[in-house]
Image (cartoon, rainbow, N blue to C red):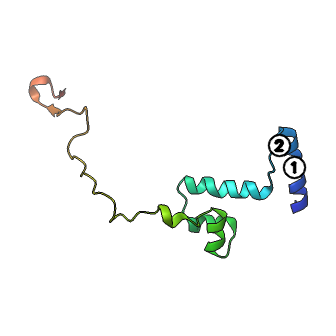
Amino acid sequence: MTTRSLQNAFHKALKKSGIKKDVTLHTLRHCFATHIMENGADVCQIKKLLGHTYIQTTSKCLHLINFEDSLTSPLDAPPKKPAKRGRPNGSKNKTHSPENGGEANA
């Protein structure tokens, strides 16, 4: 399949869907990259998937130019309270004894 035939099929489907926005195959590529990043993919993984040579190209595609502004160092964040250790909620100490026929005792 050529690039042109893919574009034609895309525009035909776009017209059939009734979407009026100016959307291109590049828009789909950008949305794909954004969604996999939102689902936890690393920028280097996205770079490889998109076939980019330079990480800067991927950063531009993902609009990561101002990413550093929202980045907080773990050292600047307030400390988290340690998690309580112990038995999970609702669990009871079960013992097996000969008095109850070896069955669990709640």
Tell me: 86 left or right of 76. Answer: left
Can residue 2 be seen?
no
- Extreme residue in the left direction: 99
- Extreme residue in the bottom direction: 54
Amino acid type of the residue that numbered disc 1 sits on in the rendered structure: His
Which image quadrant for residue 92?
Answer: top left
Query: Label 2: few (<14), some or many (≥20) within 10 Å?
Result: few
Can residue 30 be seen?
yes
Residue at the spot x=65%, y=67% of the render?
60
Residue at the spot x=69%, y=58% of the render?
30
**Relative to 39, is 88 above or below?**
above
Q: Nearer the viewer, residue 14 or 22?
A: 22
Q: Are marks 2 and 1 in contact (CB under 8 Å)?
A: no
Instruction: State the CA–CA distance, disc 2 to disc 1.
Output: 11 Å
Across and down, in percent, residue 43 comes to: 57, 65
Q: Quadrant of the image for the N terminus?
A: bottom right
Residue identifier under label 2: 20
Q: Quadrant of the image for the C terminus?
A: top left
Tell me: 96 left or right of 17. Answer: left
Task: Label 1: state its secondary structure.
Answer: helix
- Extreme residue in the top direction: 100
Residue at the spot x=15%, y=24% of the render?
101
Q: Earlier in the sequence, mark 2 or mark 1?
A: 1
Amino acid type of the residue that numbered disc 2 sits on in the rendered structure: Lys
